[in-house]
Amino acid sequence: MTTPELVAEINRKKSFLCIGLDVDLEKIPEHLLKEEDPIFAFNKAIIDATHHLCVAYKPNTAFYEAYGIKGWQALEKTITYINKKHPEIFTIADAKRGDIGNTSTMYAKAFFEDLAFDSVTVAPYMGKDSVEPFLAFENKHTIVLALTSNQGAFDFQTQLVGQKEVYKHVLEVSKSWKNAHNLMYVVGATKAEFLADIRKIIPNSFLLVPGVGAQGGNLKDVCKYGMTDTVGLLINSSRGIIYSSKEIDFAEAAAQKASELQKQMEEILNSL
């Protein structure tokens, strides 16, 4: 999916909501555990109930890898279902990969070619030769961890190297990488006050913003400091949507939570 196609979908749905599909078998409704593939059954129900409210889905691969081959098969079925039924929706493999040379190329092939995701999250710690192999894939997006929403982000990301914080150095250097126009960045919603400085460095890039909802991030603050002329934001909510209920109506409850966020987004877009 190209960036203009993503922007068109945002404008059509009046939404820049990304729903995280982080499936924990201990948290899903008990009746689904009787299914042959409870992970996929859960995801399918969530997708069927929310696809008209969001522009992206983001499975965190750890929640699938934890269940071995069955989990990986559930991930494959999930992304295949989205691509077949809702090809207009942007897909993100939240895998946080990062290695050098051929290894990164193989990671990229796994997510972009085999699984056919539109994007993948990548850790930039090892530098350009760990990220450029992902950027080599046409019309695919590499989402670099820039400033994350966890408390440990302050351990390294905001520390000064010379006169500049590490996350700012990552942002500036990444702009020089080959095919950098395919870069997006992760910036946590709990770090909304940093967005003004971030936009000075990358004024037009899309930001994937986790942390709205369960982690306490504020949607209006993120939009105030991070929104661009083409919106430039994908706001992710995972637990706050998909685990709205453990009852038989779990999908409807998830849709209600997603609708509440979408309506807030529509109000923001209409006020521009």
Image (cartoon, rainbow, N blue to C red):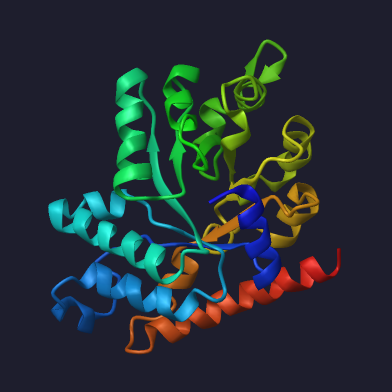
Question: How far across and how far down the image is residue 258, in percent?
Answer: 55, 74
Q: Can I make out residue 23 in this image?
A: no
Q: Where is the C terminus found, in terms of image quarters?
A: bottom right
Question: How far across and how far down the image is residue 217, in percent?
Answer: 62, 56
Query: Quadrant location of residue 267?
Result: bottom right
Front residue of 87 and 119: 87
Q: Relative to 5, does residue 246 appear above or below in the rendering?
A: below
Front residue of 236 and 85: 85
Q: Can I make out residue 176 in this image?
A: yes
Query: Farthest top residue?
Result: 162
In the displayed structure image, the side of residue 233 where residue 200 appears, left or right = right
Q: Residue at x 54, y 83 (%)?
A: 256
Q: Relative to 83, does residue 164 appear above or below in the rendering?
A: above
Query: Farthest bottom residue?
Result: 248
Q: Residue at x 65, y 24 (%)?
A: 175
In the displayed structure image, the side of residue 271 where residue 198 appears, left or right = left
Q: Residue at x 21, y 51 (%)?
A: 66
Question: How far across and how far down the image is residue 8, in percent?
Answer: 67, 61
Front residue of 147 and 272: 272
Q: Residue at x 59, y 79 (%)?
A: 259
Q: Relative to 2, does residue 241 appear above or below in the rendering?
A: below
Query: Quadrant location of residue 201?
Result: top right
Question: How far across and how far down the image is residue 222, in percent?
Answer: 71, 53
